[in-house]
């Protein structure tokens, strides 16, 4: 019997996948993650003051994890600490706008170039479906459409970026998206006022270039996609000649 039991144990060990200990997510991690997603998706406007007590109340937690999460976001330049110990979403100035746009086109363009020859036909179809999901969301015109389409937009881009296979560049892009959230929010409001081409138009151009394995065309299409939001906000800044 012992021999049979040993054989069963050995078989089970072969069939059971190797498991690693699951890390416990702390309250601070959850608070940080939610604030981070909110910033990326344009949930906060440029210049918004973030009070620890208010956020703790809204998140149903104590002030300590909120304070620590805000500190992490300040270190990532997504938020800025003011002399009176308060924290706010950075203002959109012309200098910051231009700097963010340059960095995003440079780094994200490189990821698109790397991914261009690695994406499979299944990947292309996945990108098309994501774009169709975004178009369907726009057509529904729900009250909270902006956070939904923002998440879909992020999904579209990072499907491409992950295919590039760079563990170094991806965190850089995530940081830039974190800092760009208020710009995307402002651009969405301006677009609603002025109208124009839907964001998915640029995405279809990117997909077509990727399918054709045309690296330069894909990079150019991405630059146009990124520049669209920044140009809308830049035009508003130029008209008022002040920080947004």
Image: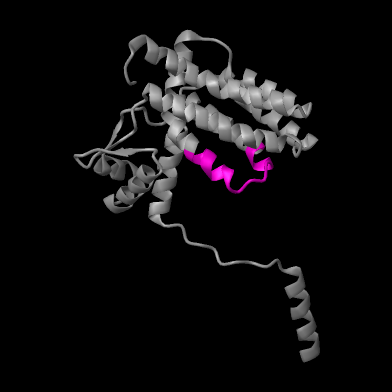
Asked whether residue 67 is in view, the answer is yes
Residue 162 magenta-drawn? yes
Residue at figure coordinates x 47%, y 14% from the top left: 192
Q: Is residue 176 above or below residue 75?
A: above
Dominant secondary structure of the residues highlighted in magenta in the image? helix
Residue at figure coordinates x 79%, y 26% from the top left: 212
Residue at figure coordinates x 45%, y 28% from the top left: 99
Q: Residue furthest bottom?
A: 2
Q: Quadrant of the N terminus?
A: bottom right
The spot of residue 110 in percent (x, y) is 63, 35
Residue 42 magenta-drawn? no
Residue at figure coordinates x 56%, y 29% from the top left: 105
In this view of the protein, which residue sits in the foreground, 184 or 144?
A: 184
Q: Is residue 17 above or below residue 230?
A: below
Q: Is residue 65 above or below residue 157?
A: below
Identify the image quadrant of residue 96. top left
Residue range corresponding to the magenta coloring: 160-175
Q: Quadrant of the C terminus?
A: top left
Q: How many marks?
A: 0
The spot of residue 17 in percent (x, y) is 70, 66
């Amino acid at each position: 019997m012992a021999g049979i039991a040993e054989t069963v144990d050995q078989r089970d060990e072969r069939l059971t996948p190797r498991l690693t200990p699951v890390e416990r997510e702390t309250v601070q991690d959850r608070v940080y993650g939610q604030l981070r997603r909110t910033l990326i998706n344009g949930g906060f406007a440029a210049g918004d003051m973030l009070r620890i007590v208010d956020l703790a109340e809204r998140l149903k937690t104590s002030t300590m994890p909120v304070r620590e999460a805000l500190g992490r976001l300040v270190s990532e330049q997504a938020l800025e600490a003011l002399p009176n110990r308060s924290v706010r979403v950075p203002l959109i100035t012309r200098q910051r706008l231009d700097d963010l746009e340059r960095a995003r086109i440079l780094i994200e363009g490189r990821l698109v170039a790397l991914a261009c020859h690695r994406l499979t036909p299944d990947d292309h179809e996945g990108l098309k479906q994501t774009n169709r999901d975004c178009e369907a969301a726009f057509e529904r015109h729900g009250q909270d459409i902006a956070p939904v389409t923002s998440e879909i937009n992020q999904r579209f881009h990072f499907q491409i970026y992950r295919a590039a296979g760079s563990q170094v560049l991806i965190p850089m892009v995530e940081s830039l998206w974190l800092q760009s959230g208020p710009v995307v929010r402002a651009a969405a409001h301006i677009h609603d006022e002025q109208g124009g081409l839907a964001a998915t138009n640029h995405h279809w151009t990117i997909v077509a270039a990727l399918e054709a394995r045309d690296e330069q065309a894909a990079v150019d299409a991405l630059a146009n996609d990124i520049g669209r939001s920044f140009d809308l906000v830049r035009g508003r800044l130029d008209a008022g000649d002040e920080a947004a």
